Image (cartoon, rainbow, N blue to C red):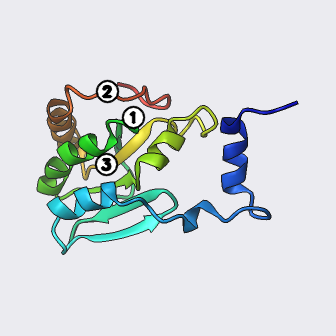
Amino acid sequence: MQLPWENVLSYMNHDPRWFEDFTRRAPSGEHLRAYQAVVPDTWRTWRRGYWVIADPPDAPVVGQGWKLHVSATSRTGAETLRRSLPVLRDAGVRFKFLMDPMAVREANGKSFPRASSGKFITVHPEDDAQFLALASELTEALKELDGPYVLSDRR
């Protein structure tokens, strides 16, 4: 029996015995270049798995609260990020985004865990007021772009 390559790919990317761990994969650069063009150097960034995490200087750590998820396709990901970054930068809010179009394609694939599927940018607002303001601003900034339905979220 021959399996489709899409089914085998998820095992190939994550099997520690036979293949290099996906955390060692270098991002292609499109998303990082977009980020670096808009967000000041004073923000701290680091990578965790497929995610690039952005922390504004002196932002309080929020123990719990709302999250905003922005979805995108591998085709619309770079433009979605470019339109979202000024909103997130100006709000001084913590967020993370998938490192490159290939990571977006994998996150939107049928073999990806359903709880994470479709999520491209995750935003951590400080409070209810910031949550509502960011939801409104991101909705306006991204209104012409498409993305998959995030199964774990309410629209």
Q: Earlier in the sequence, mark 1 or mark 3?
A: 1
Tell me the quarter of the image containing the N terminus: top right
Residue tagged by mark 1?
Answer: 73
Q: Quick check: 9 left or right of 95?
A: right
Indicate which label's residue lies in the foreground, 1 or 3.
1
Name the residue beneath numbered marker 3: 123
Give the CA separation, mark 2 to mark 3: 18 Å
Residue 155 position by quadrant = top left
Observer-nearest of 42 and 21: 21
Residue 9 locus on image (x, y percent)? 67, 45
In this view, 119 is above or below 146: below
Which of label 2 and label 3 is nearer to you? 2
Disc on the earlier residue, 2 or 3: 3
Q: Are marks 2 and 1 in contact (CB under 8 Å)?
A: yes
**Residue pointed to by mark 2:** 146
* Contact? badges 1 and 3 (CB < 8 Å): no
List x then y, in percent, for residue 13: 66, 54
Relative side of 135 to 5, left or right: left
Relative placement, left or right, of 2 versus 59 is right
What residue type is disc 1 on?
A: Thr
Q: Residues within 10 Å of mark 1 (few under 14, many from 20)?
A: many
Q: Residue at left 24%, top 41%? A: 79
Q: Secondary structure at mark 3?
A: strand
- Residue beneath the point at 74% across and 63% down: 16
In the image, 91 versus 63, the foreground residue is: 91
Residue at 15 percent across and 47 percent down: it is 87
